[in-house]
Image (cartoon, rainbow, N blue to C red):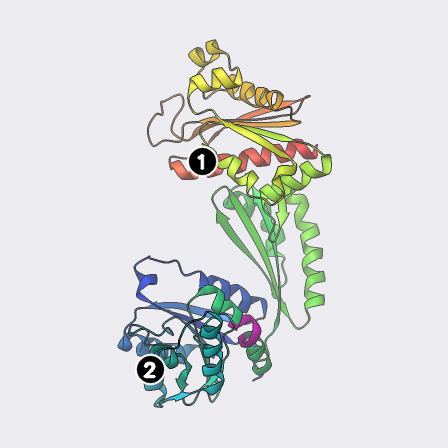
Amino acid sequence: MMNSNINVEIITIGDEILIGQIVDTNSAWMGQQLNMHGFKIVQITSVQDNREHILQSLAEAEKRADIILITGGLGPTKDDITKTTLCEYFDCNLKLDNQILDDVKTIFANMGREMTDVQNAQAMIPSIAKAIRNHNGTAPGIWIETENKVFVSMPGVPYEMKGIMTSDVMPMLQAKFSTPAIVHKTILTQGIGESIIAEKIADWENNLPTHIKLAYLPSVGSVRLRISAFGKQDEILSREIEALTKTLMPLIENYVYGFDEDTLEQNIGNLLLNKNSKLAIAESCTGGYLSHLVSKVPGASNYFVGSIISYANNIKEEFLDVNNNDLNTVGAVSKEVVEQMATNVRIKFNCDYGIATSGIAGPTGGSDEKPVGFVWIAVCNKNKTYSQSYLMGSHRQRTIERTALTALMMLRKLLVE
């Protein structure tokens, strides 16, 4: 089918999704894959394991989408009703697929288990459907075409769905539908709000060609700018985006730490590796979250030595040699204390760089002088120490996350000097 606007709807089936027992990561992953290949996702719908609800969702999806992708409800138990409901929707019966039956038998033989009647039923598919082999499980995918509409039903188990989607469904969709080329580039920023970025780049954004769009994607402590180009050739679109990025960077480069799938902690790790430098961390209000971000990067042991979570003042004194008088006069959340924490953890761990955080994460403990969300952060090397206070807001977890990301960005600035 030749069409520049191929609409897709994703339907996820399962009570466990609606009650929050599991998180629907399938739709997010499918959305990413489909978007990369020029398909337009128009709606994502989650429905319960209920025949009438599924039938209604299929009918509504068929009105607005060219492709309907369904996950869930293909298991062997009584609550898995997707196949029988599809048969009712398309007025057909279940049929035995011998290839799928052989696959299921092989799986059970490899496990040393006997097949049951329930497992035999996994090889039954709607009579008008084409089976898609599942190399990671017993439930096959189901492909149904009606005129110019395509319905694809896949298992809800994420790795099974991804296997079927990658090996068969996506190539089959690309063979049937012609979609426009689409290229994305994401610019990652930290330390600046969405509205302030919008002001800084307003003229640049207003002059974008009509086939290139900009999206603001804010999250805790950071904002991603996604540039999307639509056209006929990937190569031409990529060159256009790169040229536009070069003109955008001077406007926001002080806040940019990477592109696309980069993370701030990965960027920090690469900078430390390039400098053959080591890092130590002293945390108070972030309670280990900063160390978690740094250490979750593969290979972090090459540059991250360790940390001290000095939550209580006596730990700051005993393990970080923070001056008792400073703790009693200016308090733990202060320039003086946080700079001592960063400097002394660097020295004690014999490192090149140190970071420290101290603040009032809340929801209690604030004052007029130091309200909830007030933090001090310090970064240092053997020659310099930088510190800065921030107001991170009244939400405890957001304060912790923002403080950790801000600390990494401060370290990044010191590393690239």
Q: What residue type is labelled 2?
A: Thr
Asked if residue 246 is positioned above or below residue 93 in the image, the reply reads above
For residue 162, say whether it is visible: yes
Measure how far apart labels 1 and 2 are at the Cα level: 49 Å
Q: Position of residue 154 (x, y in %)?
A: 44, 74
Q: Position of residue 363 (x, y in %)?
A: 34, 32
How far across and down, in percent of the image, does residue 314 sit? Answer: 43, 17
Disc 1 is placed on an element classified as: helix
Task: Classify 358 as above or below 209.
Answer: above
The spot of residue 24 in percent (x, y) is: 41, 61
| Dot placed on the residue nearer the N-terminal end, 1 or 2 | 2
Can residue 150 be seen in this snapshot?
Answer: no
Which stretch appears magenta? 164-169
- The residue where tag 2 is placed is 84
**Mark 1 sits on what residue?**
400
Q: In the image, what residue type sits under mark 1?
A: Ile
Asked which secondary structure carries label 2, the reply is: helix
Question: In which image quadrant can residue 10 be found?
Answer: bottom left
